[in-house]
Amino acid sequence: MKNPGHADERSSEKRVKAIAAVSGGLDSILAAAVVSRLGIDVALLYVKHLFSGGEKKEGAVKRQAEGLGLPLRIVDGTVEHLDIVRHPRHGYGRGMNPCLDCRIFLLKTAKRVMEEEGAEFVITGEVLNQRPMSQHRGALDVVAEESGLSDRLLRPLSANLLPDALPVKEGWIDREDLYSFSGRSRREQAALARQLKISDYPQPAGGCLLTEKVYAARLRDAFEHAGADAVDIDGFRLLRYGRHFRLSDRVKVIVGRNEAENDILTGFSQGRILLEPVDVMGPTTLIEGEPSEGELELAAAIVARYSDSVEGRPVRFRVSGVGSERELDVIPLPPEDPRIAGWRIG
């Protein structure tokens, strides 16, 4: 293992500035720490969006910045990122994850910040061949070129396996101070973290929500039936909650699974039909689209099977959100009804 340099070992001349794009994970903060110890003036950049991990991930980034004593800039890229999810130039992975387009977007943002801050290059924690879609050699080259960074993109953890970036060409950084990490194993990163005394980082967990089977199926269904441009930010958020059933091309039903989800669904009721059981305990439900009377009754019958109803007895629902409020009585569908599995999304 190399002995990472320290800034105070470098020249006292005005230091070169770099922007380190960080995600809250180990690799990106390692890359920033390595370069900051080589006499480079490093500032961290975190681009948040709907799938970046929320307040928990943002909090981790803030702690990491504080731990390294490096300045942090947070940019909200939610609107632009959703457009990329809707219309990815390079397509999707196994789910609905536009990994290449996402990386290009994040690095275009980093390039803009680099120029605004008067920095010379951008740092990422990308590791060659760690991710099959976005970190093989060809993908790394595409990301560098289409982001507009080209050789102003430094990947310190795999730099010795890649062509020299501008900081090496200009002599701002010695190639010998960079690394040759490759593949999915994280042993080398863990060892480097111990050496750099970096301990505040999450263990590898599940991937992006867009790669998860259920969420991806629901998003694909929404794009197919409503159109990608019709799915707004609330539409993306709502896909995370409840049981989803597709009754027809124009009608979808979303059934709360517990009290917390019932409250969440109520918050999304504007512009949707809201079904609530009147005389028994049961789930709150949203209906998207313009159901016929038969589809409305079918939706209520599906919901009724999840309520505390007596088998064979009708359940009364309050129907609201369609200009007027009324009540509807339905017999619950039997639990063994084979159609339910066919209606379920994800």
Image (cartoon, rainbow, N blue to C red):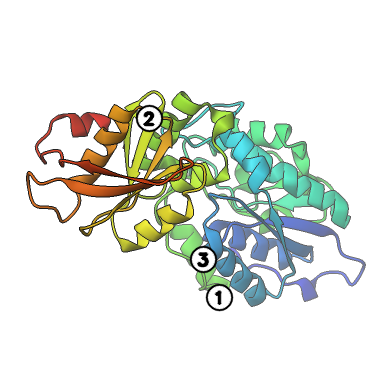
Rendered position, 198 above or below 313: below
Q: Which residue is mark 1?
A: 197
What residue is rendered at 60% in x and 51% in y?
49
109 or 139, nearer to the observer: 109
Residue positioned 77% across, 71% down in the render: 7
Q: Nearer the viewer, mark 2 or mark 1?
A: 2
At mark 3, the secondary structure is helix
Give the residue pinned by disc 3: 56
Query: How many angstroms separate mark 3 from mark 2 (CA)?
Result: 38 Å
> Helix, strand or loop at disc 1?
loop
**Front: mark 3 or 2:** 2
Q: Which residue is mark 2?
A: 291
**At label 3, which amino acid type do we have?**
Lys
Q: Mark 2 to mark 1: distance in Å?
A: 59 Å
Q: In terms of sequence position, does the residue under pointer 3 or pointer 2 come before the other?
A: 3
In this view, the mark in front (3 or 1)? 3
Find the residue positioned furthest to the right.
13
Against 91, is 80 above or below? below
Mark 1: few, some, or many residues within 10 Å (few <14, many ≥20)? few
Image quarter (top left, top right, bottom left or bottom right) of the N terminus: bottom right
Rendered location of residue 192, percent (x, y): 53, 65
Q: In the rendered image, which quarter is residue 334 located in?
A: top left
Q: How many marks?
A: 3
Asked whether, in this view, residue 313 is left or right of residue 262, the answer is left
SS for callout 2: loop
Judge left or right: residue 307 versus residue 178.
left
Type of the residue with mark 2: Pro
The residue shown at (39%, 23%) is 249
- Mark 1 is on which residue type? Lys
Which of the pair 135/300 is nearer the observer?
Answer: 300
Vertically, is 216 above or below 195? above
**Would you say the residues marked 3 and 1 are in contact, meaning their CB atoms lie under 8 Å apart?**
no
